[in-house]
């Protein structure tokens, strides 16, 4: 794996741009449109046309968010995402071709926070950037929530730090938000539609996004992800967090299939 130095941290100066966004796409027309819309929305935008250039930009200045095309010459978006995320969490919205469901699922498995399928509405992309950055921003001074705890889990929303039995959990931003939501509502069952709305902030979208994030979260938070005891599947309904460590679900694959995914 190529070594890239840890980049400087993100964060616009007070009164400055809304955030620094790195757009990675080898199609000049698509990139120009995306950059133009984000620029007019008040973002500080840089552009890269391939994977190595994207990593170079990332090393020079860590962005607040990356808009990343999957189909790149030389190094695909999956590898670019993996190399960036090796240096810590960074929000990623992936651009995929319509109909490439396997790529979308793999993108989410790689750690993307959201994806947009081509052809897409640039305005929708800006709204998704707004949503991801809004949810990934640290709480304002004086408004930080108290730590969340249960069943050996401890989440610090202010520091966005999660541990289980004292061991650090390496969660993406969406995984953290999902676990935090479950911990705020232990024992309550939520459908995938409800989780999409409450955690992602969208009233519509591909519900497999929720399924993949639940599976990834189980892989990091459960003692035995194949027989999850914390994040349980309620057949035909959705998911709930069981802090009592009750009877294990039937397994990740069967459980995910049970709620219609």
Image (cartoon, rainbow, N blue to C red):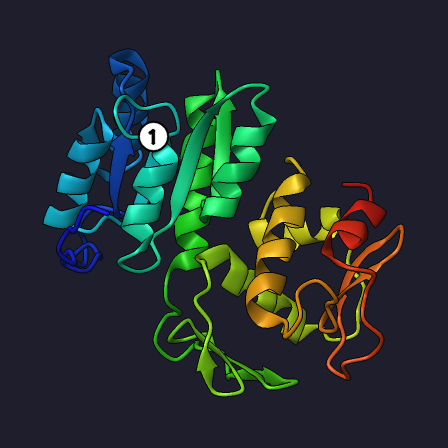
Q: Is residue 203 above or below residue 155?
A: above
**Which image quadrant for residue 260?**
top right
User: How many marks on residues?
Assistant: 1
The answer, for residue 46, to whether it is visible in the render is: no
- The residue drawn where x is 60% and y is 86% is 152
Residue at which label 1 appears: 76
Q: Residues within 10 Å of mark 1 (few under 14, many from 20)?
A: some
- The residue drawn where x is 46% and y is 72% is 169
Residue 81 picture location, percent across and down:
34, 43
Horizontally, residue 189 falls left or right of residue 181, namely right
- The residue drawn where x is 34% and y is 39% is 79
Image quarter hosting the C terminus: top right
Q: Nearer the viewer, residue 194 or 222?
A: 222
- The residue drawn where x is 84% and y is 48% is 258
Residue 17 picture location, percent across and down:
21, 46
Horizontally, residue 173 falls left or right of residue 232, namely left
**Which image quadrant for residue 208?**
top right
Q: Is residue 88 above or below residue 67?
A: below
* Circle 1: element type: loop
Horizontally, residue 54 falls left or right of residue 88, namely left
Q: Is residue 146 above or below residue 225?
A: below
Q: Nearer the viewer, residue 168 or 24?
A: 168
Residue 46 picture location, percent across and down:
18, 34
């Amino acid at each position: 794996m190529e070594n890239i130095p840890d980049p400087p941290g993100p964060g616009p100066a007070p009164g400055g741009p809304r955030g620094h966004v790195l757009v990675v796409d080898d199609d000049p027309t698509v990139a120009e449109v995306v950059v133009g819309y984000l620029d007019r929305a008040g973002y500080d935008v840089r552009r890269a046309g391939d994977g190595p250039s994207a990593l170079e930009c990332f090393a020079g200045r860590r962005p607040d968010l990356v808009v990343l095309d999957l189909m790149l010459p030389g190094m695909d978006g999956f590898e670019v995402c993996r190399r960036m995320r090796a240096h810590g969490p960074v929000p990623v919205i992936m651009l995929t071709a319509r109909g490439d469901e396997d790529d979308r699922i793999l993108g989410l498995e790689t750690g993307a926070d959201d994806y947009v399928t081509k052809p897409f509405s640039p305005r929708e992309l800006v709204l998704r950037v707004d949503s991801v950055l809004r949810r990934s921003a640290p709480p304002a001074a004086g408004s930080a929530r108290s730590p969340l705890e249960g069943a050996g889990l401890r989440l610090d929303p202010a520091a966005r730090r999660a541990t289980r039995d004292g061991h650090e959990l390496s969660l993406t931003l969406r995984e953290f938000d999902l676990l935090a939501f479950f911990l705020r509502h232990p024992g309550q069952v939520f459908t995938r539609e409800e989780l999409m709305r409450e955690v992602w902030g969208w009233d519509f979208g591909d519900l497999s996004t929720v399924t993949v994030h639940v599976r990834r979260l189980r892989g990091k938070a459960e003692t035995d992800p194949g027989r999850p005891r914390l994040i349980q599947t309620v057949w035909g309904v959705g998911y709930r967090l069981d802090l009592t460590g009750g009877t294990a679900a039937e397994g990740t694959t069967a459980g995910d299939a049970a709620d219609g995914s």
